[in-house]
Image (cartoon, grey):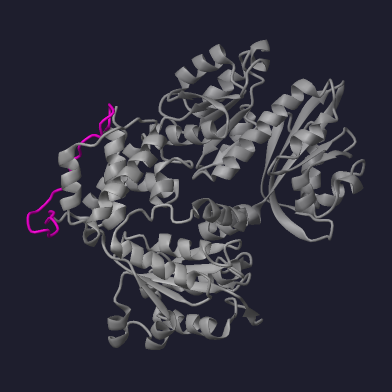
Amino acid sequence: MDHKRQRDKPLILMLDDNPVNLEELAGLVDEAGFDVLRAETGEIALVQAVAQLPDLILLDVLMPGMDGFTVCQTLKTIPTTRDIPVLFMTALADTADKLKGFQVGAVDYITKPFQYEEVLARVQTHLTLQKLKLELQEKEQRLSRIFENAMDAILTLDEAGRITLFNTAAEQMFRCKAADNIGRAVDRFLSPELYKTLTNFRNGVPAEQAIWVSEGMSAVRADESIFPIEATISRVEAIGQKLYILILRDINERKARQQAEAECNTLRGINLYLQEEVLASRDGEELIGNSPALHQAMDLVRQVANTDATVLITGETGTGKELIARAIHNLSARKDKTLVKLNCATIPENLAESELFGHEKGSFTGAIARKLGRFELANGGTLFLDEIGELPLEMQAKLLRVLQEGEFERVGGTQTLTCDVRVIAATHRDLAQFSQQGKFRADLYYRLNVFPINLPPLRERKEDVPFLVKHFIDKYAAKFGKKIQSIPERMMADLQSYFWPGNIRELQHIIERAVILTKGTQLAAVDCVNVVGAGAPTAAPIVTLDEAERAHILKALEATSWRIAGNQGAAKILGVPSTTLRSRMEKLGISKPA
């Protein structure tokens, strides 16, 4: 085992007969800073475990041939692998199956579909516990610091049931300080049923090294409120005495994460959203060009930026309306505050009010906690409402009230809140025509259209194409590690002659693809630009929605080297959870080429 101590990073062995699951989970663990071994059969996993002695093993339960239970049972009979912690990955809900996992030697389980924060937290927790078994003889005090980063509440007990360690997550779960509980009996935090289970385990019933406490048990906070839990209890030998480790998870919090992804994002912290916005906010990063049309738009930006006037940005999709909004914000007195954005076309109609104004806990099904709306997040700063023409009519009246009076209420709330927000809206619709047709409130249109800025389509500023091409080549060459010094003359001529129905965004994607395909110093010629003589858009064949979706997913997968999850994965690019992307891939018959 000495060579394990010399590793720079922990080594994790993963066994799963589904290559898609295996690659996705391996990518996540690799990004978290661990080394990974992969196996698709139980026989291969046993060979790798004996040869490499990983620090932790993740086993799928149901597999053809040798299943996960058999693999785990075999590992526990081999002297060199029996102490390696094993975690099962399973979609099984049957308590008997989970108990069987502990009976054959596993220390924990991870439930499918995966919650990635939970996966990493449990992996880190059990790596920590394994390290503890090796180091506790030298210095028991180190356990407290190691446990502080754990996501679960972790308590260690001596043979008399007194608390010896009480981590930060436990302080948060039980709402009390660790210093007030060290040395005290643990029974104050356990329901009678849970305390009886712990007592039996300390008395050797059952005789396993670890047991899983199923749903139906509860714990007690310091304020005497009771909440449902699931837990694992294990024992270790240290300095000639037994220690017991109790890991608890609040079932209500776990179920809440699974029920509503939007609420999960809120619980992860509003800071993540704000940090992403700050990273994305570059002062006119891609407002590139020297055309009169662009100069005129930027003159308007500079004139209106230092006022608090509402701005309506119009233009076709892909012309850079969000970049204009960011430029206005960054040139304004509000530049040190937050620019918050909301795409009105992407939010379900029944959640529009909650997204704009927030909601109170319990105001509707799935509202498990108070959520701040975009107006509250943008207080003191700027709110960018993209695709404002898609906002439901019912919400338009409430938005008008905020614009005129600066007041609103959260969904389910009774308190009237005020805010100081500068609103910038954008649309590719003709809102004047929409208002005449009754599809958009005329009074809201007039209130938004205080200072209009129209962005011309790329086909009307073709002199900017060479500047944009150079900018995107430099950007993606740096990203993909290429050195590109020239572009074929014919390709540049085609780019300047093309009608550009997708505008700058379409040009950006074409150059990105060309850079990826480039092998030398000259930009690779791509065949996706079809120029037509009269300057009209090319008539592309109409395909089914499934065909279009399949092609789009394949493009994202190819651009990410078939990585699905993680910050650099295709799911992130497509803006969907990785579980959703994997489900769509299976439905559309998409699999990674051999």
Residue 490 vertical position relative to residue 132 in the rendered view, above or below: below
Magenta stretch encompasses residue 528: yes
Which of the pair 374/14 is nearer the observer? 374
Left or right: 209 with respect to 341? right
Residue 52 vertical position relative to residue 310 in the rendered view, above or below: above
Left or right: 352 with respect to 464? right
Q: Residue at x 29, y 43 (%)?
A: 511
Residue 330 at x, y percent in the picture: 52, 61
Which of the pair 489/279 is nearer the observer? 489
* Quadrant position of the N terminus in the picture: top right
* Start-end of magenta stretch: 518-541
Residue 526 showing in the rendered view: yes
Q: Residue at x 54, y 43 (%)?
A: 116
Q: Residue at x 84, y 60 (%)?
A: 223
Residue 549 showing in the rendered view: no
* Quadrant position of the C terminus in the picture: top left
Left or right: 471 with respect to 330? left
Q: Quadrant of residue 78?
A: top right
Residue 467 at x, y percent in the picture: 31, 48
Which of the pair 506/343 is nearer the observer? 506
Residue 157 at x, y percent in the picture: 84, 36
Magenta stretch encompasses residue 120: no
